[in-house]
Image: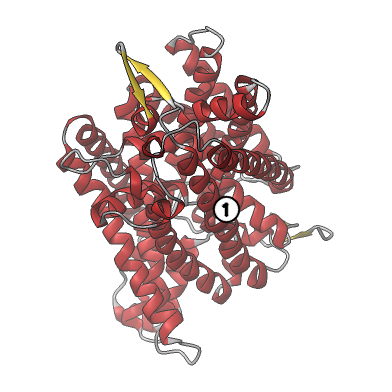
Amino acid sequence: MSAQSSTSTGMKKTLGLTGVTVNAMALIAPGAFLWMTFQLQAANVDVNGVSTAKDMWTGIVAALIVAFLTAFAFAELAHRYPDAGSGSAYYFAEKAFLDREEPAHRRWARIAKFITGWAAHLFYWVYPGVMVAFMVVLITYIVGQFGVELPIWGQIIVAWLFSALVGSIAMRGINGSTTASIVINVIQLTALVVFSVLAIMFRIQNPASVPAEGWYHPTPTSIITPHDFSGLLFQSTIAILILVGFESSTALGAEAINPKRDIPRGVLLSLAIQGLLAYLFEYFAANYALSNKLTMDVAGKTLTGIDAAAASSAPIGDLAILIGNAFLGGNGFAFMLVIAATVAIAILGTTLAAMNTGVRISFAMSQDKEMPDIMGLLHDEYATPYVGVVLMVVVSGIVGTIGLLGGVVSLTGITLASNLGTFVLYALICGLTVVAFAGRKEFSLLKHGIIPVLGVIVNIIMLLAIFVIGIISGGSTAAATYLALGISAAWLIASALYLLIVSQREGRHIVPPAHEMATK
């Protein structure tokens, strides 16, 4: 870290490549999502009710391709516009059009940044609340292992306390968040390596105790080989949810010492380390160790293997107990508690990184008069957008409470609402990359044409797959999908009304006439 220097926004430039990268890595958090999403992936079935779980690992590979296409677009825009500050995608949307010579192009700058800002807010302001709900679910599971049942009012209190805790860390500035992120990443990656190595050893050293047909994947190649295209697609729609966050480093431009160099690198490095290395390794290990030794009693019926994983609220915890008993002298329960503790720490890091990104984009929009001025107020000591942090704590508490009160349906619904914002944002960024570079001497057909266009296509496919599949599936899945669409529509309407009211009050055009732009 270098000596602090102030930016024009009042924020301090303190982050090097390490700081930029670890803050994004904290949002991806493979330790948290392996625990939280393995059950959803194990339970996933297609529209015909056939399990898609055998394509869990290959689904992650497909989602990684989507993520890297998008990450490359973010990196190219961050390199072209290093002065984006905390605006991230919001700033990119405006500059991509304002930099065009033709007035007819520049006139679309404001509406482009409005749509991009709306999508970014739907993602970053709902996502922390989802993480708050997941944290409470984890805590409820842990205390339940000791015979303590946490009532719903107790769960809500925990949700608000956790939201306030994360907000207090975010309030102290990005340096405190960076230190926390480094510690969190080291702890969760270490725990993941230990768990994954033991899981692989469990399979290698127990071939005689489990019949060949007892292993969910009979061979290692079965894990990494696609089994069914529709199953791969179904699994990828879940897997993409565990990869979002690499782009959060682009909101740290105002606090990066060398944003032109470090922001693009941070985007790609965070995704490579957490997604390409951590996720592929840990999911391979977990699938490799899955056998009929994993059991679950449901309504008097004993389920085994993938069925047990689908029925359990924490199949990774159950696997940790099984593996720990085999290798740690019967101390599987203690091993599970250690892994659960690292998951809790990882969720803390994910929530913190999302809060930091969300309030900084809101800060940038307030500086641009596209959000209330109060969102642009900075803390006198920590130089953080403290009003945004306080509001984020409240919103996260509310969203987390909704996720807890409505059970699986509402928790899935708020998650899908955040994901809708994610895919819209990602598709927009890929499209904006083409706009920003088309016709310029630095234009590359591969980097600024083929890759971002593919990014637009795959993000739209993923978006449609999630919601079309959700509606077709019916039942609680459809109910959650409709809830997500309702939340998204409500946010869009509120945002559009604010845009219209402010524009009318200040006499600003939403889409100015071309002749007006020609004079600027």
Q: Quadrant of the N terminus?
A: bottom right
Instruction: Name the amino acid, label 1.
Output: Gln
Residue 387 in view = no
Residue 450: give x, y in percent of width and height: 37, 79
Q: Nearer the viewer, residue 127 or 373?
A: 127
Residue 483: give x, y in percent of width and height: 26, 35
Left or right: residue 377 compared with residue 118: right
Residue named by callout 1: 274
Q: Secondary structure at mark 1?
A: helix
Residue 34 in view = yes
In this rendering, is residue 376 above or below 35? below
Residue at figure coordinates x 69%, y 61% from the top left: 256
Left or right: residue 38 compared with residue 279: left
Left or right: residue 435 compared with residue 319: left
Q: Quadrant of residue 512?
A: bottom left
Q: Residues within 10 Å of mark 1 (few under 14, many from 20)?
A: many
Q: Nearer the viewer, residue 109 or 374?
A: 109
Hey, which residue is sitting farthest right in the picture?
3
Q: Nearer the viewer, residue 436 or 289?
A: 289
Residue 73: give x, y in percent of width and height: 46, 70
In this rendering, is residue 410 above or below 287? above
